[in-house]
Amino acid sequence: MSETRRVCRYCDEPVADLDGAVFLWHEPGLLGPGRDIYTHRVHADILVSRLPPVLAPQAQGGGRDHP
């Protein structure tokens, strides 16, 4: 069985160093198991800061319902 290829969600470059990979989420597939989404550790803060407050309330300092 081949090893899963990890591609950075931010820069679309392969994530060769598994210690430098950050798991973000799992995208379910319509006709299969889906895939795990990764990013380089240096890009993780950039991606999380772009998420809506509903998806990352702690990362964005809270939404309307979160003090």
Image (tube, rainbow, N blue to C red):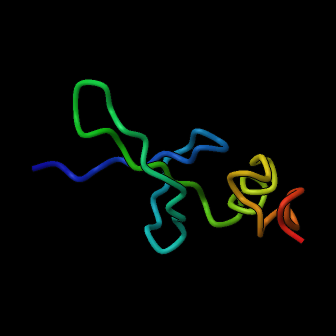
Image point (60%, 59%), residue name: 40
Residue 12 against residue 46 in the figure, above or below: above
Q: Is residue 17 above or below residue 49?
A: below
* Percent position of residue 62, x then y: 85, 65
Q: In which quarter of the image is the C terminus?
A: bottom right
Question: Percent from the top left, x then y, of residue 53?
Answer: 79, 53
User: Would residue 25 be found to the left or right of residue 50 on screen?
Assistant: left
* Point 28% across, 50% down: residue: 4
Name, please, the residue furthest toward the left: 1
Q: Which residue lies furthest to the top in this view?
A: 31
Frontmost residue, 50 versus 7: 50
Image check: 67 left or right of 57?
right
Residue 11 location, quadrant: top right
Q: Which residue lies furthest to the front in this view?
A: 65
Residue that appears at 35% across and 47% down: 5
Q: Residue at x 84, y 60 (%)?
A: 65
The total number of labels drawn is: 0
Residue 17 x %, y %: 47, 66
Is residue 25 or residue 52 the one in the foreground? 52
- Left or right: 23, with 55 as reference point: left
Q: Which of 50 and 22 is in front in this view?
A: 50
